[in-house]
Amino acid sequence: MDMEKDDFEVTPWDVEGNVDYRKLIEKFGTERLTENLKERIHENAGSKNFYINRDFVFSHRDMDKVLDDYEEGDGFFLYTGVGPSGPMHIGHIISFKMTKWFQENFDVNVYIQFPDDEKYWTRGKKYDDVERFAQDNLKDVAAVGFDPDKTFIFKNTEYIGNMYKAATKVAKNINNSVVSAVFGFGSSTNIGLNWYPALQILPTFFEEGRCLIPAGIDQDPYWRIQRDIAPKLDRKKAAQIHNKLVPALTGPDGKMSSSEPRNAIMLNDGPNEVREKVMKRAYSGGQVTKEEHRKKGADLSVDVAYQWLRNLFIDNENKIKEIGKKYGQGDMLTGEVKQILVEELNKFLGEHQKKKENKGKKIKDKMMYKGELAKKMWDKNIEL
């Protein structure tokens, strides 16, 4: 992507600049989530989704076909994942919460991949470090509350024996020029990463129906390759529904990253850490002085605290409109909005950490090995 022309860049690994999501839809060739499609999703689900209502989930590929399949009785299944390169942050959890909503309201299976191999190849970490992060991340995912009998969580290095034969068929249909063009691989890229897209794509074929992937828009390139090769394997093209990227505390440019924990809210942060990070580091759309702010008000479009509240936390439409109106016209100060965010974050994290501590390991073990779907997956080799 041309940074000079667009002033932003989005890849599966890096996001730079202030992303223009309208331009990104054009660049990636995805489709905007229209009001009609939103209504159709909600009608089939029997409930409304907060992220979809707020346009935080904004783009898709073939979501209409997913609903066609569902309405015709063919169904679909869900796939998502996270790379265990460090503690998880608040941005990671959004796609999991979105995936859980689809599972609950459409009664479908969920497959969650932990690409521990990819993180070993790309992050320069020892396997012991990757495994330690994986065990902690697994409990975070379990705490989201997926149905343990309809969810299968797997680590690539552990499940590879069941996947290898099918993965070779996927790999045969992907050449080096394709992965180089999509991911920028070059002569110095280790050969593990050349192989990895085959493993990333394979779970989209775990069932014969259509796969739906709720994910950040930055992950879309993986699925372009899947959609190219699926017909060759006599399988359906994967569908995606994309959320916007959660910005770092320090501003609207880029996205939150575990590699910059000072600028992120980590899922294991305590109340004091949350308060200090938000109050000191959250980028403000307010004016420099109190007097100027009272006169001009805040720029809500760049204010991190307001955007997080609107897109991630405050479901009550009247409440967020009131905050936006008062803050936008200068009747509410930055510190007041940040304080509201601190309270919302600590409430969310407190509940999440309690579930992780009390039930995380037990539920994680069931979703990996002992639940109905998990036992079924361990009893078979994936076939294509």
Image (tube, rainbow, N blue to C red):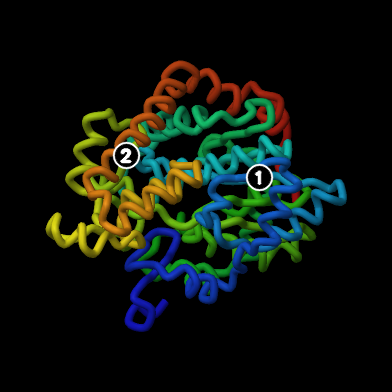
Q: Which residue is mark 2?
A: 340
Q: Is residue 31 left or right of residue 299?
A: right
- Furthest residue toward right: 72
Q: Is residue 278 left or right of residue 82?
A: left
Picture quarter with the N terminus: bottom left
Q: Residues within 10 Å of mark 2 (few under 14, many from 20)?
A: some
Answer with the quarter of the image where residue 262 lies. Answer: top left
Helix, strand or loop for disc 2: helix
Residue 155 appears in the figure: yes
Amino acid carrying mark 2 in the image:
Ile
| Front-most of residues 71 and 375 | 71
Rendered residue at 46%/27% (across/down): 139
Give the Cα separation between the discs numbered 1 and 2.
34 Å
Percent x, y of residue 143: 49, 27
**Placement of 286 over or under 186, stated as above or below:** above
Amino acid carrying mark 1 in the image:
Leu
Answer with the quarter of the image where residue 228 lies. Answer: bottom right
Residue 78's tag is 1
Nearest-to-viewer mark from 1 and 2: 2
Residue 381 appears in the figure: no
